[in-house]
Image: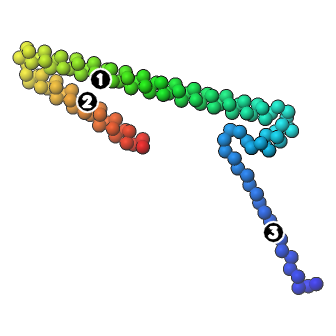
Amino acid sequence: MKGKQQLSANFIAEQHYSGPIPPPEYLAKYNEIHPGLAERIISMAESESLHRRKIENNMTKSYVITTYLGMFFAFFSVCIISFLVFYSISKGFGKEAAGIAVGAIASVAGVFIFFRRAVKKQK
């Protein structure tokens, strides 16, 4: 039988999963190797998830507090600058009052533009 050719085929199979918990068949194999290991893996994933959510909640609270503090100090600064401008005008220092007003407006506009650009870069 010299004319026959032999064909062979090789197959390679890969399995991938993502996430902290492996598929059930892997968990069963882990339990075969060491009883209770699957439960430890699941509890580890649960505690990691709880930790991540706690960190996200703390970051959100910090962001809100920072935002409100920023608004408060911005309002307070505007009140002080307004008082200085009106006081300077009442004492007859009109040019100085104009300088204070222009400087304050320029600094507020600069901060506004800086943060607007920073937000655009993040997106």
Residue at the spot 83% in from the left edge and 74% down from the top edge? 7
Judging by the rendered image, the residue that carries numbered circle 3 is: 9
Using the image, determine if residue 116 lies above or below residue 14: above
Q: Earlier in the sequence, mark 1 or mark 3?
A: 3
Using the image, determine if residue 74 lies above or below residue 36: above
Which quarter of the rendered picture does the N terminus lie within? bottom right
* Relative side of 5 to 109, left or right: right
Give percent across and percent down for residue 42: 73, 33
Residue at the spot 80% in from the left edge and 33% down from the top edge? 37
Residue at the spot 52% in from the left edge and 25% down from the top edge? 58
The numbered mark at residue 121 is: none
Q: Quadrant of residue 100?
A: top left
Q: Circle 1: is it few (<14), some (14-19), or many (20+) Cα within 10 Å?
A: few
Q: Earlier in the sequence, mark 1 or mark 2?
A: 1
In 3D space, how far apart are the residues under numbered discs 1 and 3 (Cα atoms)?
Answer: 73 Å
Judging by the rendered image, the residue that carries numbered circle 1 is: 74
Using the image, determine if residue 112 lies above or below residue 12: above
Give the residue furthest to the right: 1
Q: Identify the amino acid type marked 2.
A: Val
* Relative side of 105 to 59, left or right: left
In what element is the residue under mark 3?
Answer: loop
Residues tagged 1 and 3 counted as in contact (Cβ below 8 A):
no
In 3D space, how far apart are the residues under numbered discs 1 and 2 (Cα atoms)?
Answer: 9 Å
The numbered mark at residue 108 is: 2
